[in-house]
Image (cartoon, helix red, strand yellow):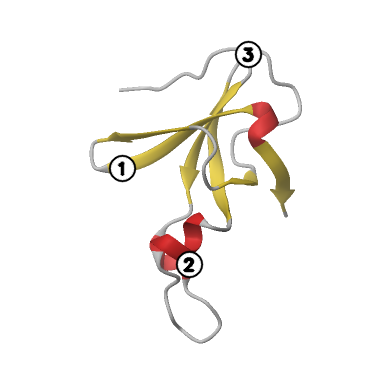
Amino acid sequence: MKIIPRDKQVLVKPQSEESRINEFGLITPDNVEQEQKAIGEVLAVGSGIKDIKKGDNVLYGAYAGEKIKLKEEDFIILFDEDILAFIK
C-alpha cells in the first residue's frame, strides 16, 4: 500500500523509540514526549509543497496532524504549516 498526501500535506514517519534515548541512556517516556515537540522523517509530500522534500527531518507539534497505523507502523499526515523547523 502506498500513501500519497494531498496538495499541502506531508507524510511523516515519527522518530523511533531507539532514537529517543537521551545522553544518560534512558528512553524518554511517551507521556513526556507528548508534552514536547516531535521529530520525524518526511516520506512523501503533496503536489502543492515546494520547500519540503522526501528525506527531510522535521520538527512538529506533538499533537499536530492525523496519526495513522498501517502494517504495525506509525505515520502522521501533517499540513505543511504544522512543520515548525527542519533538523539538519
Residue type marked 3: Ser
Q: Foreground residue, 73 or 79?
A: 79
Earlier in the chain: of badge 2 and badge 1, it is 2
Q: Please, what secondary structure does the residue beneath circle 2 have?
A: helix
Say which residue label 1 marks: 73
Q: Please, what secondary structure does the residue beneath circle 1 have?
A: strand
Q: Position of residue 36 (x, y in %)?
A: 58, 58
The circle drawn on residue 20 is: 2
Earlier in the chain: of badge 3 and badge 2, it is 2
Q: Please, what secondary structure does the residue beneath circle 3 have?
A: loop
Say which residue label 3 marks: 47
Camera-near label (3 vs 2) is 2
In screen coordinates, is 18 left or right of 64?
left
Residue type marked 1: Glu
Badge 2 vs badge 1, beta-carbon distance below 8 Å: no
Q: Position of residue 42 (x, y in %)?
A: 56, 38
Q: Quadrant of residue 56?
A: top right
Q: Looking at the image, which residue is at 69% across and 29% down? A: 81
Q: Where is residue 15 in the image (x, y as percent from the top left)?
A: 48, 54
Category of crowding for the residue at label 2, using alpha-carbon neighbours closer than 10 angstroms: few (below 14), some (14–19), many (at least 20): some
Q: Looking at the image, which residue is at 40% across and 68% down? A: 29
